Amino acid sequence: MAELDETDLLARADAAAQRHWPCARVGGLRRLHGGVSSLTLAADLDLPGAPLQQIVLKVAPPGLAPVRNRDVLRQARILRSLSAAGAVVPPVLFEDAGTPPFFAMHHVRGDAFEPCLDVANDPPCRAVVDARARTAARMLADLQSLELAALGVADEPVVPIAAELDRWARLLSTVDPEICPGHAQLHEKLVAEIPDRCAHPTLVHGDYRLANMLFDGPELTAVIDWEIWSIGDPRIDLAWLLMHTDPVHAFAESRGPANSAAGAGMPGVHQLLAEYRAIRAVELPAMDWFLAHSYYKTASTIAALVKRNRKAAHPDPSLEVAARTLPDLIERGRAVLARADQWK
């Protein structure tokens, strides 16, 4: 990936902001952690007669075609639609289709924390984790209840379940078999048992979990990181959220008492399902298949990261911790597929 020309980006951000507010200025550019397909930067928006505002810029990676998950203007499109529908997402302020394209959104207060995986200096307490997870389940039901036509995305192609599975199979095909042993056998079983398509496709976030939400204490302030949104089967996002109540993978050798206590605050699968169904009372057939698919997807993404990490000049030790969990992820997926339906 080419280096980002921050001087050029600031000049373009100034011009884009001034198309909405004459005399607006953008400054104080600084890198943020967030997202894996685009660059995330904080900046200050100075509007005459108004307090200085902190904004966030999402920029397509320089030197790479801004397509699929790197298409930041597509992200801006869904955020605008969701914001107009009243969803809790960061409001988009302005955008620029130049090279590389970018958009700006309000900086939203809050912190992101995955209760059973992350390590934080001051993690939320068990009660806050419980409240956050229940809110996330209800918010997912709300998002999946939105009419596609009202969001302006009814013309988007529906991603078939088989295509979603194939996406992660293609990624695993680029990884040496010894990194993730047994994945081909799990894939074979998933292919053999692909469930019937959902009669009513919905908006799919693609990585719907607490780490991709901002909370101020127990209050949800934004659902973020819409890089891989699509229209597809709602069970994909639901299973992904439920998998994170008891993840098999890990990125730390140990998490300490406070972070472990935070993880213990995560409600169980059936508690989150009850929250979801209180808003969206729908049948959920074949959820075990979607949960097994979630383990397969996790193994695929981690294996690809491990492959890249082992070639890096300064490898991240947390990814070697994750590498050791890959056989367990595959085994959990196979075990879930083999059991009787647990979702009634």
Image: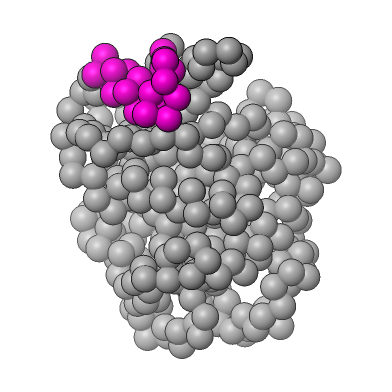
Disc tally is: 0
The image quadrant that residue 330 belongs to is bottom left
Q: Is residue 52 magenta?
A: no
The residue closer to the viewer here, 223 or 133, is 223
Quarter of the image with the C terminus is bottom right
* Percent position of residue 215, x then y: 68, 38
Q: Residue at x 21, y 55 (%)?
A: 174
241 lies above or below 109: below
The image quadrant that residue 297 belongs to is bottom left
The residue closer to the viewer here, 97 or 138, is 97
* Percent position of residue 107, x then y: 55, 29
* Percent position of residue 160, x then y: 37, 76
Q: Residue at x 26, y 14 (%)?
A: 7
Q: Residue at x 26, y 39 (%)?
A: 97
Q: Residue at x 42, y 71 (%)?
A: 154
Q: Is residue 286 visible?
A: yes
| Horizontal arrangement in the rendering, residue 114 relative to residue 28 (left or right) | right
* Percent position of residue 168, x then y: 33, 62
Colouring used for the render? one colour
The image quadrant that residue 187 belongs to is bottom left
Q: Which residues are magenta?
A: 7-27
Q: Residue reaching furthest right?
A: 127
Quarter of the image with the N terminus is top left
The residue closer to the viewer here, 266 or 16, is 16
The residue closer to the viewer here, 247 or 86, is 86
Q: Is residue 16 magenta?
A: yes
65 lies above or below 289: above
Q: Is residue 227 visible?
A: no
